[in-house]
Amino acid sequence: MAEWNSAPYFPVYLKGLTALAALSPDADIAARSRRAIQRLIEQIAHSCHQGMLTASQGRSYEHTLRAGRSLELAAISRLLWGKGNYGCRFHALPQLALLLRDHGLTLDPALA
C-alpha cells in the first residue's frame, strides 16, 4: 500500500484484505487483515467529505478524479455512514458488507 489516499487502489487493497479476513484458516493472518481494513477505513473516514475523497491522493488518474461521486470509495462511505453514492462497479463493497454482517468486523463508531 505505497499510495496514500488512493481512490482507485484502496478498493483493490480492501478486496484482498476482506477475503483474507473472512477466509484465512490462519487466525493471525485473519486478525492482521482485519486491523489493516480498520486502518484503511479510518483513512477513508478522515479523507472524505459527504462521501467523496477530498484529501490529497497518491496514485490517481484523471478519469477517477472526475468521477468522484461514482467511485467505490463513495459507495463504501454510503454503506458505512450513509453519505455518498453507489456507483456501478465494485471490487470490495460486497465483501466488506459481508464481513461486517457475517464475520464480525467492527469499526470505531467515532469514525461516523
Image (spheres, rainbow, N blue to C red):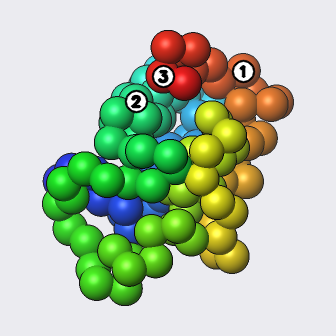
Which of the two discs, 1 and 3, labels the residue nearer the N terminus? 1
98 sits left or right of 43 in the view: right
Look at the image and tell me in which quarter the C terminus lies. top right
| Residue at the image position 53 percent from the left and 67 percent from the top | 69
98 sits left or right of 32 in the view: right
Marker disc for residue 75 = none
Q: Is residue 72 visible?
A: yes
Q: Element at badge 2?
A: helix
Name the residue carrying label 2: 42
Q: Element at badge 3?
A: helix
Q: Amino acid at mark 3?
A: Leu
Q: Element at badge 1?
A: loop
Q: Amino acid at mark 2?
A: Glu
Residue 77's spot in the image, x, y percent?
Answer: 57, 45
Residue at the front extreme, as displayed: 50
In which image quadrant can residue 8 be found? Answer: bottom left
Which of the two discs, 3 and 2, labels the residue nearer the N terminus? 2
Name the residue carrying label 3: 111
Name the residue carrying label 1: 104
Which of the two discs, 1 and 2, labels the residue nearer the N terminus? 2
| Residue at the image position 61 percent from the left and 45 percent from the top | 83
| Residue at the image position 68 percent from the left and 40 percent from the top | 82
Q: Amino acid at mark 1?
A: Gly
Q: Are marks 3 and 2 in contact (CB under 8 Å)?
A: yes
Q: CA distance from mark 1 to mark 3?
A: 17 Å
Residue at the right extreme, as displayed: 102
Q: Are marks 1 and 2 in contact (CB under 8 Å)?
A: no
Residue 89's spot in the image, x, y percent?
Answer: 64, 74
3 sits left or right of 91 in the view: left
Could you say which is closer to the camera, residue 33 or residue 24? 33
Depicted 1 relative to depicted 7: above or below: above
